[in-house]
Amino acid sequence: MMAASSAGDVYGRGMTSQRARDRLVARLRQSGISDERVLAVIGQLPRHLFVDEALASRAYEDTALPIGLGQTISQPYIVAMMTAAILRNGVPQRVLEVGTGSGYQAAVLAMLVPQVHTVERIDELLYSARRRFRRLGLKNIRSRHADGNVGWSEEAPFDAILVTAGADELVAPLLRQLSEHGVLVAPVGPPGQQQLLRVQRDGENWVTEKLGAVAFVPLLGGVV
Ligand code: SAM
């Protein structure tokens, strides 16, 4: 994943070491995450590089953390659950993420699927995420500064779409950018009542399943 010369910095030490990642994986397993592919990636990927240095020592707690500009890096349990939900029927070839944020979820996906597209509305966050992708040698991520409410039509269809910000309702253009049997995973519902939904497309039918209660930052419009 990354150049050997920088391996020491990248893999961390003490609170950011391999032992810290192993403890996080053990905790996720206890919490019910059973997809070994997802657990293996979370055990390898240095989450401390996706947060500010001042928060690095907390990077392997199973908690969301601030990444600036009012946004958060999602809780590892939620990242694991969302990722497992799109891998359930096999590995999707092309995945779209809406809400790049720190880039952590996109990086997890990039280690599991051939091609990741990710869209972020806040330029400054996207800039930092791209630097992390480069540092980690993740070459199968394409990113775009745009409003993800309209998806990425030039690159559609996608076998899976993962939305990492909450909307009151499912976003219709995203549902339409799913491939024939594609899967969308998204937090939906008013603040305080959000549910994580998994929607499986079957031609012109979309079958919805609730995965549990969640609390995501809002899906907003426009770009900054
Ligand atoms: N996936 C991220 C990670 O791994 O760090 C966490 C994302 S954070 C919970 C939600 C992100 O969605 C924020 O960075 C926010 O700016 C972004 N966002 C909100 N509305 C958006 C939109 N319409 N289009 C693209 N990104 C959006």
Image: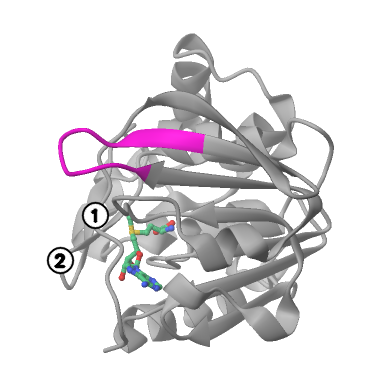
Q: Residue shown at 40%/61% (left/top)?
A: 50
Indicate whether residue 14 is drawn in magenta: no
Pointer 2 and pointer 1: residues touching (CB < 8 Å)? yes
Q: The residue under label 1 is which amino acid type?
A: Val
Percent x, y of residue 184? 60, 48
Q: Which residue is mark 2?
A: 70
Observer-side mark, 2 or 1, equals: 1
Q: Nearer the viewer, residue 30 or 175?
A: 175
Q: Residue shown at 28%/42% (left/top)?
A: 189
Q: Residue 213 vs residue 49: left or right?
A: left
Please tell me how crowded label 2 is: few (under 14), some (14-19), or many (20+) other residues with Cα within 10 Å: few
Report if the beta carbon of the residue with label 1 is closer than 8 angstroms to ligand 1: yes
Give residue 217's mark.
Answer: 1
Report if the beta carbon of the residue with label 2 is closer than 8 angstroms to ligand 1: no
Kindly indicate the quadrant of the structure image that contains residue 3.
bottom right
Dot 2: what SS?
Answer: loop
- Magenta residues, start to end: 188-197
Q: Quadrant of ligand 1?
A: bottom left
Kindly indicate the quadrant of the structure image that contains residue 43.
top right
Which mark is first along the chain, 1 or 2? 2
Dot 1: what SS?
Answer: loop
